Amino acid sequence: MINEKTRILAHLHDLRITKPGSFWAATGIAGVSLLGMVAAFGTSPSTLDLQVPQQTITEQLYLPVGLAAEKIEGTFVREERIQRGDSVASLMTRLGIQDESAFRFLRDNRNAQAVFQQLSPGKPITAHVGENGELQVLIYPLNGKDRALFVERRDGLLQAHEQMLPLDNQVNMKSGEIRYSLFGATDTAGLPDSVATQLADIFGGDIDFHRDLRRGDRFAVIYESSSYLGRPMRTGHILAAEFANNGKTYRAVWYEDTEGKGGYYTADGKNIRKAFLRSPLEFSRITSGFTSSRFHPILQKWRAHQGIDYGAPSGTRVKSTADGVVDFVGNQGGYGRAVILRHQGRYTTLYGHLSGFAPGIRKGARVAQGDVIGYVGSSGWSTGPHLHYEFRNNGVFQNPLAIALPSAPPLGAIQLAKFHAYAQPQLDRLNLIKDSNLALLD
């Protein structure tokens, strides 16, 4: 995801964002007898007091993965977080482990070598250590997984295996305002990049994130996440979102039907997904639009340009704009490496100048909207890395950025009633946070 964001941000303006600072709201000095007292209160323009009923909840706490509730006899439990510059030796010292055999085990055992290979700053590590410093149990979360390396001493010998982590699931609510870019705003709001990408996917049928973003556009998001011992482990999908763009507000709520199929719907139950996405790339810039006359840089003559060119780094993922079947995959003249998809019988889309094709993309293969079908390149008649995208209706070229895109089928009457009952609490949450200005960028 970091590499993906780097490619995306390569096309955004290098602008500085100044975060709002705190300020003194009030100061007062009063003399009482012989004593003076100074009172100062700090407030922030980006903070909102929400008047929400409070409730006291008592919850049973449990020891981390695999540990019984009762303390292992003769041991103590320590938790540390990896710091920059840490080595396994320094980490073991802070954990109170004085056990040369444990160090050799972590270094030499194939399953335990992840401790040496994944020293990520901030990662929590839990250890049970004996009275003489011998390691009894070690729990080490693995990078990019909901699992931990579990090292324990049994019958005097250390053993290592992977085990699922007991994750804490949370529902998060954030809001923000666009100043320069979507990623700039979501970073300031503390939203993970995956949530920003989901936002663009959800509203991509109504908002062209290449051209339509305006300074002052606002968003509110409710999404799921999971953590272990306070460290974020993964981000789930968005439960509900609102995006106000250029004076118009769009809302979406995630809903799963009785068959387990999920999708995003408007507040009145209409499917927010369009039959076609506006763009086959998540983020990029348009380098050449749909026109009846354009000077071709290679042919050196004026001719029609019946598609959209998106400038993007080589290797950027290209997505199918709609459900369909692969009609062609291979080299096709000036298009270079290209994929042609057929949709609903009469529509076709073409993706040209690719550097390569995604696994499984072959003639006759079925693809779903949003599936990766290839990667941006510069094959064929191309002066640099970009994607050439065409949209045809019964063989007639059309401008994909100008035509009205049909929506996917709505919910039926029975499902609609269930949707309204489920969606209302989510919409109430959006109402609660949409004006809170939690991520105002000054």
Image: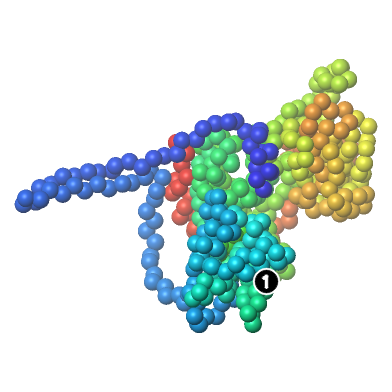
Residue, disc 1:
160
Q: Residues within 10 Å of mark 1 (few under 14, many from 20)?
A: many
Which residue is pictured at 58% across the width and 55% down the height?
A: 87
In the figure, is residue 70 to the left or right of 41? Answer: right
Q: Is residue 135 visible?
A: yes
Quick one: 290 or 159, which is closer to the camera?
159
Which residue is pictured at 52% across the width and 62% down the height?
A: 93
Quick one: 180 or 65, which is closer to the camera?
65
The C terminus is located in which quarter? top left
Q: Residue 316, located in which quarter of the rendered image?
A: top right
In the figure, is residue 393 to the left or right of 75? Answer: right
Which residue is pictured at 65% across the width and 65% down the height?
A: 104
Color scheme of the displayed model: rainbow
Q: Is residue 71 visible?
A: no
Type of amino acid under label 1: Ala
Quick one: 365 or 255, which is closer to the camera?
365
Q: Residue 109, percent across and down?
A: 71, 66
Q: Residue 78, percent across and down?
A: 49, 68
253 shown above or below 390: below
In the figure, is residue 191 to the left or right of 117? Answer: left
Numbered label tally: 1
Which residue is pictured at 33% across the width and 46% down the height?
A: 43
Q: Residue 244, located in which quarter of the rendered image?
A: top right
Please identify the residue farthest to the top as the structure is shown. 301
* SS for callout 1: strand
In the figure, is residue 379 to the left or right of 214? Answer: right
Q: Residue 389, percent across and down?
A: 80, 36
Quick one: 116 or 81, which is closer to the camera?
116
